Image (cartoon, rainbow, N blue to C red):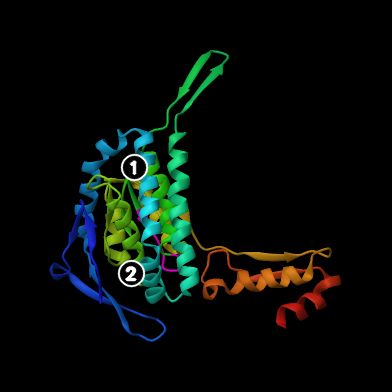
Amino acid sequence: MHQTHMIIDGEQLPISSHKVETICNPANQEPVALVSVGTRQDARMALEAAKKAFPLWSETACEKRAELLHSAADLVRERAKSIARLLTQEQGKPLKNARAEILSSAGILDYYAEEGRRNVGEWLATSRGRSVVLRQPVGVAALITPWNYPVDLLSWKVGPCLAAGCTFVAKPPSHAPVAATEFVRAIYDAGLPAGVVNVVHGPGSEVGAELVENPISRKIAFTGETETGRWIMAQAALHIKRVSLELGGHSPFIVCGDADIEKAAAACAQRAFSNMGQICISVNRVYVADEVAEEFTDRLVH
């Protein structure tokens, strides 16, 4: 059985020293992995490690950070087959979709590697002279992600974080932490300094709360339910932390009278039921022009 360790300051914390949970395949309930479960103390240790690593990483030239991110993307691709299998086993999505998610996440690292090269600021002419705008990393980031796209949604946080010169502590979802942890491990194995990337498993009420409340974290990136997002925003305000919140929403599907009905029906069904309907932009209501409503309904049903 696969063993999933937490990563703190470049070290894999042994499972034997922590509470352990078994991740089971949702299709047949067979055990997939043993996962070490952290505590507030583990989260604090990870934040301290990220804080210690921040000066070195933030002062690393953007070209060097880009080089390491590209190397990380290549390593993720090399390990895509094994990571995708773990993702399918723990989360339930088809293997084809899981592999596409891993490869897409590698592409996201490549994208932000190049964006980081252009993080050079601005020189603005004004009526009173010239203004220089500098962009600097904010510090340690806390990255909290859900189970529906555990690698993809993490990559969208990890990529810009590292490219900007920030260090991070990630808390992957408790129900699907394995592939996300292997993704971060691949990034670290590409040659990043110890402490730049950290992963702590555990419940949001303990690990997540520590990452949000601890003054060491200066940026919170969270994808999840709206109620939790409100709480994070309130807690972040106490320390004037920056937040990026991707929360629950509504996604109407609109079919106009001149639409290609066959394509519209196919797109509607795909968007509504993709990933078992567990997607933040899943269709949850449909508006159709009266003149094509019957035809659209018939195509959608059949």
**Residue occupying image coordinates x 77% and y 81%:** 298
Q: Callout 2: 10 Å neighbours few (<14), some, many (20+)?
A: some
* Residue 20, position as x, y percentages in the image: 21, 73
Question: Where does the magenta region start and end?
Answer: 143-149
Q: Establish if 70 lies above or below 29.
A: above
Is there any visible trace of residue 244 in the rendered image? no
Q: Amino acid at mark 2?
A: Ser
In the image, 105 versus 42, the foreground residue is 105
**Magenta stretch, overall SS:** loop
**Please, which residue is most extreme toward the left here?**
17
Q: Gap in Å between the C-alphas at discs 2 and 1?
A: 24 Å
Q: Which mark is residue 174?
A: 2
Q: Establish if 147 lies above or below 118.
A: below
Q: Is residue 147 magenta?
A: yes
Looking at the image, residue 126 sits to the left or right of residue 43; the answer is right
Residue indicated by mark 1: 166
